[in-house]
Amino acid sequence: MTLKLIRLELARDEEFPQGSRAHGYDITAPVDDQGQLDAEEWKNYKDRCRVRRFWGDEEEDIGHLVRKPGGSWAFHYDIHGDPDDDEGGYRFNLHKFVPGEYVSIRDHDDDILRTFRVILTREIA
């Protein structure tokens, strides 16, 4: 299994009617042949499963892709030690991380569920 870099960019919403290439995430994660996150392989690579949140002019947040009790996925940022500040992926276990698909993430700052488009997936070493 190889890890993949996944690029998510904000899809259109009320605040950004055209979407935004300046708002999104870069995620490093194991993805299976169907494009889904691989929970078993994540256990082997969890230290390398990283996330970078870029949000316009704000400072980037760097963290890890983590599994929560019950099997859900979230982003835990190094700067935020409190698990309550994690950003939760909405049904990440069901979604395909392939270009053109959409996923949703609950923002930790204002507790808004935002939709993102998968722009890119590429294998990394």
Image (cartoon, grey):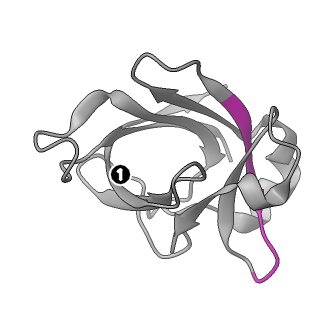
Question: Which residue is at 39% across, 22% downward?
Answer: 56
Residue 16 at x, y percent in the picture: 20, 41
Residue 45 vertical position relative to residue 20 in the rendered view, above or below: below
The local secondary structure at tag 1 comes to: loop
Q: Is residue 32 visible?
A: yes
Quarter occupied by the C terminus: top right
Q: Is residue 58 left or right of residue 48?
A: left
Q: Nearer the viewer, residue 59 or 63?
A: 59
Q: Is residue 40 left or right of residue 97?
A: right
Query: Which residue was labeled with disc 1?
Result: 98
Q: Nearer the viewer, residue 6 or 90?
A: 90
Question: Which residue is at 35% across, 51% downward?
Answer: 98
Q: Nearer the viewer, residue 97 or 59?
A: 59
Question: Which residue is at 28% across, 57% downward?
Answer: 101
Residue 74 at x, y percent in the picture: 67, 58
Q: Residue furthest bottom?
A: 70
Q: Would you call the spot at circle 1 few (<14 residues within 10 Å), some (14-19), or many (20 or more)?
A: some
Question: Which residue is at 49% across, 36% downward?
Answer: 25
- Residue type for callout 1: Val
Residue 85 at x, y percent in the picture: 73, 53
> What secondary structure is the magenta-colored segment mainly?
strand
Residue 51 vertical position relative to residue 105 in the rendered view, above or below: above
Q: Is residue 54 left or right of residue 98?
A: right
Tell me the quarter of the picture where residue 40 sits.
bottom right
Task: Answer whether residue 67 is magenta in the image.
Answer: yes
Instruction: Tell how many labels.
Output: 1
Tell me the quarter of the picture where residue 64 sits.
top right
Region in magenta: 62-70
Q: Is residue 35 visible?
A: no
Q: Residue furthest left?
A: 18
Task: Answer whether residue 110 is magenta in the image.
Answer: no
